Amino acid sequence: MATEKSSNEYEGLLPFCLRWVKPIFAKLPAMAVELATMTTKLAKDDTRRVVHALKVGLAITLVSLFYYFKPLYDGFGTSTMWAVVTVIVVFEFSVGGTLGRGLNRVMATLLAGALGFGAHYLASLGGDTGRPIMLGLFVFVLAAISTFIRFFPKMKARYDYGLLIFILTFCMVSLSGYRDDEIAKLAYSRMLTILIGCCFTVFVCVFVCPVWAGTDLHHLVANNIESLATFFHGFGAEYFGLLQEQGEVGKVDMQKYRTILNSKSNEESLTNLARWEPRHGKFRYRHPWKVYLEIGSLNRECACRLEVLNGYLQTKRTQMPSQQIHGPFQEECMKICSELSNGLRELAMGLRKMVPPLTAKAHIEKAKIAAENLKSHLEEWRFEEMNNNNNALEIVHVASLSPLLLDTICCIVKIVDSVQKLASIAGFKAVEVPSSVAPEQDQGSMQPCHGDVLVAHHVIMIHEEAPC
Amino acid sequence: MATEKSSNEYEGLLPFCLRWVKPIFAKLPAMAVELATMTTKLAKDDTRRVVHALKVGLAITLVSLFYYFKPLYDGFGTSTMWAVVTVIVVFEFSVGGTLGRGLNRVMATLLAGALGFGAHYLASLGGDTGRPIMLGLFVFVLAAISTFIRFFPKMKARYDYGLLIFILTFCMVSLSGYRDDEIAKLAYSRMLTILIGCCFTVFVCVFVCPVWAGTDLHHLVANNIESLATFFHGFGAEYFGLLQEQGEVGKVDMQKYRTILNSKSNEESLTNLARWEPRHGKFRYRHPWKVYLEIGSLNRECACRLEVLNGYLQTKRTQMPSQQIHGPFQEECMKICSELSNGLRELAMGLRKMVPPLTAKAHIEKAKIAAENLKSHLEEWRFEEMNNNNNALEIVHVASLSPLLLDTICCIVKIVDSVQKLASIAGFKAVEVPSSVAPEQDQGSMQPCHGDVLVAHHVIMIHEEAPC
């Protein structure tokens, strides 16, 4: 019986394995296809990723020349390794990241090396028994303090890596000194190879297709404003069912604003990286990167309102899909949306091209006037049509839309103000650009734009009229 | 003239330096006070930070014993350094972080070590000329591929550090092999010291006051739900001016929901860390951490609505500060807020104590009924008071509040559903807890709670009535 069972087991082993392995092999082609699709998508979405991978390979290959040429290798010996290690850990996607990490690594190594020497010297005064105790104490205290400092938000944002390298180098120099008498040579060659590694990295990073975190941040914020514009471009038409004939074309783009809601950490890290970067392109050394955080935060506030507006759109679509809204309401709402969309698009374009957004505020102002008109229409209409019970749902809808739109306009005014603040601090210069939005500017506008004086006048009006 | 000038310059050097240094020295006391305040705040906000710093110090001191005892040091020689380096770079704040980094480091070192050996062997077949070329090619290709793989979102979230260590070890083993014939010994002792370092780190991290990322995530999500509850607790009273006599007490707490808006990256990183953690406390090994992300995302959607509600509150406060709202409206609105607040608080408490939130849904259901009542009151009242023009502002306000509250309730229903899903997947068990919210439950409730059957009935109703 037992033999039969074990024989059965033996016979069953192959089928059992096959049963286990088969689905894996069956899945392999699908997995390979998925991997290929994902790789292509990643590479297509941002070709700089491929370039970055090649750049890292190039930098490591360049620095490994130190191994291949005997005269170079003899100079540093096994310390040559630190040059390679430095290239690998310092090379980041953006120039800011690489410079930040490189500077952190060099400064921390210098400081910790010197302190490690000091600790080594002090400990050696303690004699054979006192030496390990004192060294242990130094290491414990410095490691604990540095680790705690890493919790300070400002230090974490910019010097986290430096603090890590500080603990690491201090321990390496002070502890190695306990067993190795050539500690000075060790520290010197480590320092030198780290410097060489940093130089290679920074050279490749800056001179071969550089990726600037500052430029990325700039475009990210401009794109986010553009996404807000896209939402308003579609919202009016979707709400009043004007898009139904054209199908679902506008819908996909409208949801772009959703990425803004979670953009905070990305914007913050890009700002931190951008601050390490030297002058590049149109960006000066002390470009006001912090203002982008302000604009980003207002963008998110606005996107929150858009999220609620989008919710209204869904409700409208399901509860009263084909109901026509009273003519004047529709007209004013469409006008608000088109003015907001044009204003925001102009703002985004101005930011992208680094020219002052002169006419953006006039558009927003027109939207504000239209919103006020909508409010008074609402009042009049309530008394005219009060006997018509069919419009109950309509009044609730438009009445709820009106304060939300007004609130959103207030939020957008703040965005425009922030972008104008950025433009004045960073010194954006007006140029005669043949604006692509220009043909749209007149569409739906009632008054000619009087430029900055009008804009300033309206700003004061807004502050008097509504608490933005 | 020239001499006079240079003499002037010389005389002016000390005052010049003083003028430059003085403000720095003058600022020193203020800076010291600020630093001390910040340190105390950081330590008080989370005492685990201090404990973590001491733990890191302890682990490094423990592992540095390898240097002090000659027999231990002789076993590994200079490779002992890798044990210290491993402790420093692997030790993270949470157990999940430490285990993740440790496993990444060990697995990547093993894999890259083996591949490095292979590359070294293959390159040695190429002869003196071919060897550096082949090695360079291997290093380039592997570094480029690994760097590109770091862009895959799933890899970045969990294996970013492993990929970095993979490139590092591969380069170290294959390149060192070019100059050092004892490559096998090098790889072996590096592997062993890294393992020792990881063991020390994990030991100290897990057994000395462990910080579990999973527990942190669990409490973060529960606290966020509590913040939503706090908002509703204050909103009704603030909106109808009932809090004005009590001063600004409730206001500070109400703004807590704002931190939810930017909680995504924190929740995502905690989820990634929690997935590395073994069974601990009430959390099993395969605790459904991903459901927390779902709840977190719904919390953010809800917080967006709260942001708009908060905007309405500001408008109400400035535009009609002392205007009384029609009685029945106020009653229903207050009821909605109190039910939502109680329901959410119960949900948060259930989540925190890991018991199924049985009655939370009944509260939300009552809020929904009150919102429907508000809507019908609005209709009736419009016809009753249509001749009274003074109420124009009032109707716009309440009419705009009503759909927004309904939308928010829909969002909260989804949160309750997600928490119930979590409770059923994670197997939360009902216990007889003397609930601290219990006395509040009956306050303002009209119908007795019929338990789960009623809840299920209401869920269906909600889906039939409104598109949530």
Image: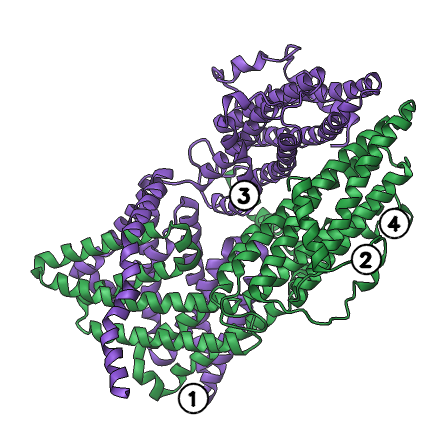
Chain colours: A green, B purple
SS at mark 2?
loop
Q: Does B120 appear above or below B239?
A: below
Q: Which mark is residue B128?
A: 1
Mark 4, residues whose alpha carbon is within 10 Å: few (<14), some, or many (≥20)? Answer: few
SS at mark 3?
loop
Do marks 1 and 4 both belong to one polypeptide chain?
A: no
Q: Which mark is residue A448?
A: 2
Q: Does B224 appear above or below A69?
A: above
Mark 3, residues whose alpha carbon is within 10 Å: few (<14), some, or many (≥20)? Answer: many
- Residue B262 position by quadrant: top right
SS at mark 1?
helix
- Residue A420 position by quadrant: bottom right
Report which residue position mark 3 lands on.
B263
Q: CA distance from mark 2 to mark 3?
A: 44 Å
Whether residue B84 sits left or right of residue B232 in the image: it is left
Q: Amino acid at mark 2?
A: Pro
Q: CA distance from mark 4 to mark 2?
A: 35 Å
Q: Does B8 appear above or below B165?
A: below
Q: Chain of mark 1?
A: B
Please name which of the two marks, 1 or 4, marks the residue nearer to the observer: 4
**Dots 2, 1 in contact, CB < 8 A:** no
Report which residue position mark 4 lands on.
A247
Where does the image place residue B463, in percent across and percent down from the top left? 76, 27
Q: Amino acid at mark 1?
A: Asp
Q: CA distance from mark 1 to mark 4?
A: 68 Å
Q: Chain of mark 2?
A: A
The structure residue drawn at horizontal position 51% and vertical position 64%, both measured from the top left corner, is A274
Residue at the extreme front: B1
Q: Earlier in the sequence, mark 1 or mark 3?
A: 1
Q: CA distance from mark 1 to mark 3?
A: 57 Å
The structure residue drawn at horizontal position 9% and vertical position 62%, both measured from the top left corner, is A125
